Image (tube, rainbow, N blue to C red):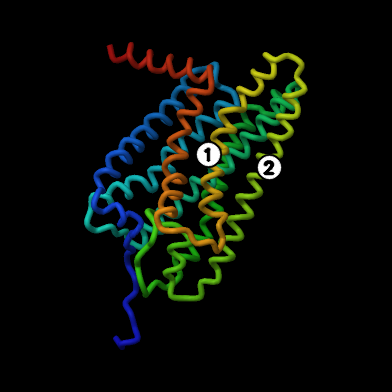
C-alpha cells in the first residue's frame, strides 16, 4: 500500500454524544425512561383500538397503525443511542449504518404518508359526511395503510443501494447521534454534489406532504366554522385536534432537520434537533391521542381493566 492510499472505512464513529461524555448516565437514564414510555404508550394505543370494536373505523385504524410504526421508528435509533452512551466504543459497522438509515427513514416515510392519508380522511369525513361511509370503506382503509408502509419502504431502496456503492476511505466520524444521509454522505471519498440533489428530493417530498395536509385543514376549518351550533363545532374540532397536534410535532421537527439546505447549525443545536425529531415527537404521540380523545380514554381504561381482571 502506498502512502497516498488509505484503508477503506468499515465502521463509523458517532461524535454527537461526545459533549455528554462526562454525564452520560444523566442522559442515559431519561432516554431509557422515554424509550420505555414510547413503546408502552404506543402499544397501549394500538391494542386499545384493536380490542375495542367501537373504534374499528378508518380514523382509529390509521391511529393504531401510526402508533405501531412509532415503536419501530424509535427502535431503529434509540437502543443504539443508549448503547453509545454507556460504551467507550461509540461505533457502528458500515452495514449497520446503512440498515439504520434504511429502517429509520422508511418508517419515517411511512408515517409521513399515513399522516397525509389521515388528513384526507378527516377532510372527507367533515367536508363530505354523507358520502364518507361509501368512500372510506374498510377495504380502502386497509389498502391505504398497507400502501403507506409498502411505498415508504420501497421508495428508499434505490437511495440506500446507491450509498452502499460509494467509497469511504477518509475520516469515519459521524457528527450526529445516529446514521443520517447528510453526515454519512459527507464522509464519502467521491464527489458529494449529490448531497444537494438529496436535499432537494427530501425537501420536495416534505413540502408536498405539508401542503396537502395544510390545505386539507384549511378547508376543514372553513367547513367547521360554518356549523351553526357551538356543540357541533366543538365535536368536529375534537376529532381533528389530536391529528393536527401530531402533524405539527412530526413535520415541525422534520422541517427543522431536513429543510435547512446549506445552513450549518452549532453541534449542540444539531443534536437537540435530532433528539426532538427522533425521540420527543414519538414521545408525545400517545400522550396527544390519549389525552385529547374521549373515546380513546375509554378504550384505554377498558384495556387496562381487562388486563387487571385477567391478571387476577
The answer to the question of whether label 2 and label 1 lie on touching residues, with beta carbons closer than 8 A, is no
Between discs 2 and 1, the one toward the N terminus: 2
**Is the C terminus in the top left, top right, bottom left or bottom right quadrant?**
top left
User: Where residue 218 sits in the image (x, y, percent)?
Assistant: 71, 35
Farthest residue, direction bottom? 2
Residue 245 placement: quadrant: top right
Question: Which of label 2 and label 1 is nearer to you?
Answer: 1
Q: Residue at x 47, y 60 (%)?
A: 181
Residue 78 position (above or below residue 240)? below
The residue at the point 44 percent across, 71 percent down is: 188
Q: Camera-side residue: 225 or 120?
A: 225
Vertical arrangement, residue 5 with respect to residue 312, above or below: below
Question: Which of the pair 107/79 is nearer the observer?
Answer: 79
User: Measured from the top left, where is residue 237 in percent x and y?
Assistant: 64, 24
Rounded to the nearest angstrom, the CA distance separating label 2 from label 1 is: 16 Å
Find residue 225 and name its label.
Answer: none
Name the side, left or right, on which 265 lies relative to 119.
left
Q: Using a 10 Å C-alpha cutoff, classify the residue at mark 1 as few (fewer than 14 neighbours), some (14 to 19) or many (20 or more).
A: some
Q: Mark 2 points at which residue?
A: 212
For label 2, count other residues whose C-alpha is less than 10 Å away and answer few (under 14), some (14-19) or many (20+). some
Q: In this view, does 47 lie above or below 216?
A: above
Who's the residue at 44% across and 58% down the image?
A: 266
Classify residue 112 as left or right of residue 81: right
Name the secondary structure under disc 1: helix
- Where is residue 281 shown, x and y percent of the image? 47, 39
How many numbered discs? 2
Residue situated in front as seen by the camera: 62 or 198: 198
Q: Quadrant of the N terminus?
A: bottom left
Q: Residue 3 location in percent, x, y?
A: 30, 87
Q: Residue at x 50, y 20 (%)?
A: 296
Q: Which mark is residue 249?
A: 1
Under circle 2, the secondary element is helix
Amino acid at each position: 500500500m502506498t502512502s497516498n492510499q488509505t484503508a477503506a472505512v468499515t465502521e463509523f464513529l458517532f461524535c454527537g454524544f461526545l459533549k455528554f461524555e462526562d454525564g452520560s448516565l444523566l442522559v442515559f437514564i431519561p432516554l431509557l425512561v422515554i424509550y420505555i414510555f414510547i413503546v408502552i404508550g404506543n402499544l397501549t394505543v394500538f391494542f386499545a383500538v384493536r380490542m375495542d370494536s367501537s373504534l374499528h373505523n378508518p380514523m382509529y385504524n390509521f391511529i393504531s397503525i401510526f402508533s405501531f410504526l412509532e415503536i419501530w421508528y424509535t427502535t431503529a435509533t434509540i437502543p443504539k443511542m443508549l448503547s453509545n452512551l454507556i460504551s467507550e466504543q461509540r461505533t457502528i459497522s458500515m452495514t449497520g449504518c446503512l440498515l439504520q438509515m434504511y429502517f429509520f427513514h422508511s418508517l419515517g416515510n411511512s408515517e409521513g404518508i399515513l399522516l397525509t392519508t389521515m388528513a384526507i380522511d378527516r377532510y372527507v369525513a367533515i367536508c363530505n359526511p354523507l358520502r364518507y361511509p361509501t368512500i372510506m370503506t374498510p377495504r380502502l382503509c386497509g389498502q391505504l395503510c398497507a400502501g403507506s408502509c409498502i411505498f415508504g419502504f420501497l421508495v428508499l431502496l434505490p437511495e440506500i443501494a446507491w450509498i452502499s456503492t460509494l467509497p469511504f476511505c477518509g475520516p469515519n466520524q459521524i457528527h450526529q447521534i445516529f446514521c443520517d444521509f447528510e453526515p454519512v454522505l459527507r464522509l464519502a471519498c467521491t464527489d458529494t454534489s449529490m448531497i444537494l440533489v438529496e436535499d432537494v428530493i427530501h425537501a420536495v417530498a416534505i413540502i408536498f406532504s405539508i401542503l396537502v395536509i395544510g390545505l386539507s385543514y384549511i378547508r376543514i376549518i372553513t367547513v367547521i366554522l360554518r356549523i351553526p351550533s357551538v356543540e357541533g363545532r366543538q365535536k368536529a374540532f375534537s376529532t381533528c385536534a389530536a391529528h393536527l397536534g401530531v402533524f405539527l410535532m412530526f413535520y415541525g421537527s422534520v422541517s427543522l432537520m431536513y429543510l435547512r439546505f446549506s445552513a450549518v447549525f452549532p453541534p449542540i443545536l444539531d443534536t437537540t434537533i435530532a433528539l426532538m425529531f427522533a425521540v420527543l415527537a414519538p414521545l408525545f404521540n400517545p400522550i396527544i391521542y390519549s389525552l385529547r380523545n374521549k373515546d380513546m380514554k375509554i378504550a384505554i381504561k377498558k384495556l387496562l381493566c381487562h388486563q387487571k381482571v385477567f391478571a387476577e
